[in-house]
Amino acid sequence: KGFVLALCHLSLGVYNEELARRERGNTTEHEEPTDATVVMYWSLSVATFSIGGMVSSFLVSFVSDIRGRIKGMLFINVLAITAGLLMGLAKMGTPYLMVIAGRAIMGLYCGLSSGLVPLYIGEISPVKYRGAMGALHQLAIVIGILISQVIGLDFLLGNDDMWHVLLGLSGAPAILQSLLLLVCPESPRYLYIKLGKVEEACKSLKRLKGDYDTSKDIAEMQAEKEEVMNEAQMSILRLLRSSVYRQQLFVALMMHLSQQFSGINAIFYYSTSIFQTAGVGQPVYATIGMGVINIIFTLVSVMLVDRAGRRTLTMVGLGGMCCCAVAMTVGMVFQDVYSWMSYLSMAAIFLFVSFFEIGPGPIPWFIVAEIFSQGPRPAAIALAGCCNWTCNFIVGMFFPYLEGLCGNYVFVIFAVLLFGFTVFTYMRVPETKGKTFEEITAVFHHKRGAPPSKPQEEAEMVQLKSSTEA
């Protein structure tokens, strides 16, 4: 944190006497710059990213249906490239304004991308490998995090001379993705169900799976299309009001709540101080070690998610994180009494991250696309994405105050939340492994206990279909 704020003095164009004293070596090694202007601008640059994600997540449904999945992802890459250019060229203008503007635009991009990518993956993946394909999205994210941690080391790009290059490189993956998307087929479900283009859907299926008989997949999409014609395309407001999808929406939102309120971002916030207390000379390398663990256990999730199932891995992950939060609390409370307790805290951090990547990290992003049919799916993903980004913003803004209030007992709160999320997953989240979209929908109808009668359900569907909002 101290390094980030020190770098912020330069990247935001603020230079003061306190920074000068640091350069002359008249401050202690871990003393943090506290200039109010720097803190304000840094907080603003962090907040605008999350707010951008919250706002743009509502546009996922619009972009995905109007532009299509592939064209939508190509279109939003303009935002990432623009943001990268703004931050990369910050030294040529007013640094703090360009950094804040770049962060805001990058937030808009990430909010859209975090919805469009899982939507596309869920629609093109075979039922047998849908979970593994969905988990690959999280794997790409954690690989990107590790790369950024490595190139952000002070002897590479994380220094006073190269910080703008480090920030500007955030737009580079969008350029690579734009090139790769040109050879990717459009979603067959979007082509067949949304646009009614049968021949193009068949061509897309063959590009994805090779030359084969597409009649079975076409028949499945036809059945889903007939259901969509009854349920109509739903707006976000209609989805919130509809009783037909209330169970699915509740599960989707709770899955994303469990991801962000698990305390994973708080762990990254706290990890450096715990590593320092344990006597780690270079805590930044321990943080990179956490990034490596992220990748390893996300790979474990990729291999297990279609075998063990989504529900099982989520419960194992949340339950393990709950135990780790308790262990971390014990370690932090007694680390001044028993020196070896700091190592317990370190072990708990690494295990916490491991359990997160097994289930609660990757699964919420793709399970929303599984539990909703084609009609309400884009709106549901938009709502879930907004929920995720809002929770991310809340944790980022209020955890430091919560930590100041609770001290070493702050992770007791997350332990209680994790226990509640584990119980909820056991009670309410169905297993979607190996099931078609129709079968998953039937599971939720059955879980309602007393499903609405056919006339009642048809009446609601007719009302939705005739609504201008739909």
Image (cartoon, grey):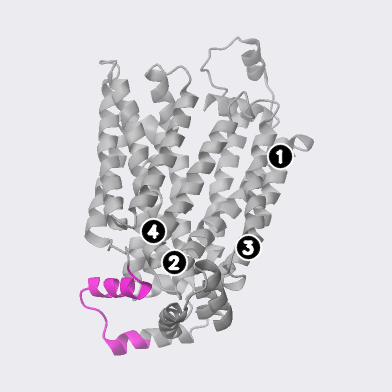
Q: Is residue 456 magenta?
A: yes
Residue extending furthest toward the front: 211
Circle 4 residue: 131
Circle 1 residue: 88
Image mark for residue 243: none
Circle 2 residue: 380
Per the model, the C-alpha gap separating discs 2 and 3 is 28 Å
* Residue placed most toward the observer, 413 or 449: 449
Q: Mark 3: which secondary structure?
A: loop
Which of the two discs, 2 and 3, sits closer to the camera? 3
Upstream in sequence: badge 3 or badge 4: 4
Which of the two discs, 3 and 4, sits closer to the camera? 3
Residue 36 lies, with reference to residue 440, above or below; the image says above
Which of the two discs, 4 and 1, sits closer to the camera? 4
Q: Is residue 271 magenta?
A: no
Q: Mark 4: which secondary structure?
A: helix
Per the model, the C-alpha gap separating discs 3 and 4 is 23 Å
Q: Mark 1: which secondary structure?
A: helix
> What percent of the width, then of the height, locates residue 354?
35, 39
* Residue placed most toward the observer, 183 or 186: 183
Q: Are marks 4 and 2 in contact (CB under 8 Å)?
A: no
Residue type (three-letter) at the residue carrying disc 1: Gly
Upstream in sequence: badge 3 or badge 1: 1
Q: Mark 2: which secondary structure?
A: helix
Residue range of the region highlighted in magenta in the rendering? 435-459
Residue type (three-letter) at the residue carrying disc 3: Val
Residue 225 lies, with reference to residue 239, above or below; the image says below
Per the model, the C-alpha gap separating discs 2 and 1 is 35 Å
> What percent of the width, then of the height, locates residue 194?
53, 79
Upstream in sequence: badge 2 or badge 1: 1
Main secondary-structure element of the magenta-colored stretch = helix
Which of the two discs, 4 and 2, sits closer to the camera? 4
